[in-house]
Image (cartoon, rainbow, N blue to C red):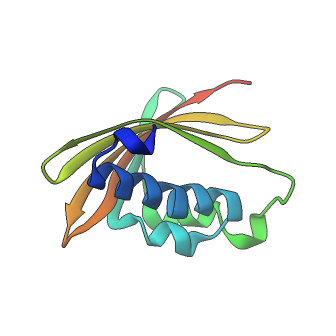
Amino acid sequence: MKESNMTVDQQIIQKAILAYYHAGHAQYDPELYRKILHPEWKLFQIVEGNLEEVDRDEFCDWYAPEKFDPGLVWETDIFSIDITGDVAAVKLSIQNQKVKYIDYLNLMKIDRKWWIVHKIYHEIQQ
């Protein structure tokens, strides 16, 4: 998204996603995720036809620093940020040389801060 066409809240959300969500992936730093994923955050995914729920702590464990692969280069492209009042929906792609995901993130503005509260995604086979 072009920043010049964005509202202030869209710019805040975009910067936060890049600084914490994207960087959390790129640096395998769970502390960055904790700055944008609400403590009650949930990921919903389909595994072998079944709906599974993942909480923030389990997700952060997937990106623990000891699992860092310096050879992976992560890229994030934000397609849309739709805001109504204190809720927002973001569609983005996040990928590296091995995986590509289309993420749908729901955010809520709580105590003047935008938090990701929910995520679903689709993995694109490369």
Q: Position of residue 95 (x, y in %)?
A: 66, 40
Q: How many marks?
A: 0
Q: Is residue 54 left or right of residue 65?
A: left
**Quadrant assignment, res 23:** bottom right
Query: Relative to 55, is 21 on the left or the right?
Result: right
Residue drawn at x 57%, y 70% is: 30
The quarter of the picture where residue 126 lies is top right
Where in the figure is residue 104, as x and y percent of width and height?
Answer: 40, 38
Q: Nearer the viewer, residue 48 or 99?
A: 99
Q: Position of residue 62 (x, y in %)?
A: 63, 60
Name the residue at the left extreme: 85
Q: At 79% across and 38% down in the image, what residue appears?
A: 97
Q: Nearer the viewer, residue 5 or 93?
A: 5
| Residue 64 visible to an observer of this rendering | yes
**Residue found 21% across the figure and 70% down from its top:** 112
Q: Nearer the viewer, residue 76 or 117?
A: 76
Report the quarter where the N terminus lies.
top left
Q: Is residue 80 left or right of residue 19?
A: left
Q: In this rendering, does residue 52 appear at all?
A: no
Decide which of 8, 99 is in the foreground and name it.
Answer: 8
Compared to residue 40, the image places residue 92 above or below, namely above
**In the displayed image of the protein, which residue is found farthest to the front?**
4
User: In the image, what residue occupies the spot 33% across and 43% down?
Assistant: 6
